[in-house]
Amino acid sequence: MRHFIRSAAVAIAMAAASTLSISAAMAADISGAGATFPYPIYAKWADAYKKETGTGLNYQSIGSGGGIKQIKAKTVTFGASDAPLKGDELESTGLAQFPMVMGGIVPVVNLEGVKPGELVLDGPTLADIFIGKITNWNDAAIKKLNPDAKLPDQAIAVVHRSDGSGTTFNFSYYLGDVSADWKSKVGVDKALEWPVGIGAKGNEGVANNVSQTGGAIGYVEYAYAKQNKLTYTDLINKDGKKVEPTAAAFSAAAANADWSSQPGYGVILANQPGAESWPMTSATWILVYKKPDDAAATGEALKFFAWSYAKGDDMAAELDYVAMPDAVVKSVEEMWGKDIVDSNGKPLYSGM
């Protein structure tokens, strides 16, 4: 794993907006759309890249489902998704897929007097809350995990994603892994038939709804919890250890991942073993055409991604994301040079 520094101070220049646009000359911009999970780090990278190169990034933070639809419709240069496409879909669509960065999904709550990290939940209890079995904060299951906490006699207000979301895919994948009830009754997907709760669009929407609703619980990418000063909970991981969400915990979950084991590097990191592993760790992926209609635009996008791999680690760490390992970056860039070509078969990427 490449070097990263965990910073206590988080600076997210444009994380409140749902669309990122950094350029006066829009015609020269790199266009992308999709996952809200990586939006804070894409915003930070884009700002630095614009200052260094003059090239901007126009990224619509609309959710993974929307990003997949837009790249398939060829309305953007790249799509972004936290739910990887499977090999047969990549093959049939002519898309290449590669992971850009990793991070953690966290439960967030709005309980008076409860500070970040003061509450702990485990997977089965979290599943029972989101499935509607546990409806009050003073439920015996929550009390058992938090014997010293002052839990209110207050109804739980569940907040979930309303859009097609890779964050939801990874969240539901984890719940399905720890709860047979969840797996059979709700399932795993980017969009779900939720048993309870209210829907909100994007990580931004869930963060805002939780912050404004007493007794609420939701799930967001960790940078959104820090940015909005939300109260995140700790979790009990697969090894039965209480862990807090940190870059080190996200990195521990990814330490043993075999990225070459799945087409398009589509490895799911939920509920990984290890005493220090955060159980809701996730990667996020980029989708581009192997033979794009606009080869020049895709070439510019690959330059941005290569720059982000090479120079973006510390910026990622400041937001508690985890950079991809060197070996994965090398493999991805080799794939670019071999698979992503113009109409004449000439590679669009030849190195930084």
Image (cartoon, rainbow, N blue to C red):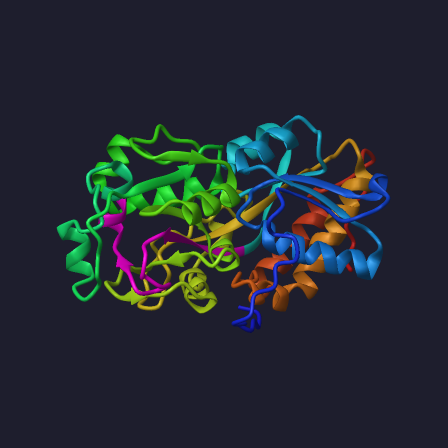
In magenta stretch: residue 343: no
In magenta stretch: residue 125: yes
Q: Position of residue 92 (x, y in %)?
A: 58, 28
Q: Position of residue 249 (x, y in %)?
A: 41, 66
- In the figure, 172 relative to 114: above or below? above
Horizontal arrangement in the rendering, residue 32 relative to residue 27 (left or right): left
Seen at 55% across and 73% down, the residue is 5
In what quadrant of the picture does the C terminus appear?
Answer: bottom right
- In the figure, 41 relative to 77: above or below? below
- In the figure, 226 relative to 215: above or below? below
- In the figure, 16 relative to 64: above or below? below
**Residue 262 shows up from this direction:** no
Seen at 30% across and 44% down, the residue is 175
Which residue occupies the extreme top position in the image? 73
Q: Which residues are magenta?
A: 102-127
Q: Position of residue 152 (x, y in %)?
A: 22, 53
Q: Position of residue 147 (x, y in %)?
A: 16, 64
User: Looking at the image, which is closer to me, 27 or 81?
Assistant: 27
Q: Quadrant of residue 129?
A: top left
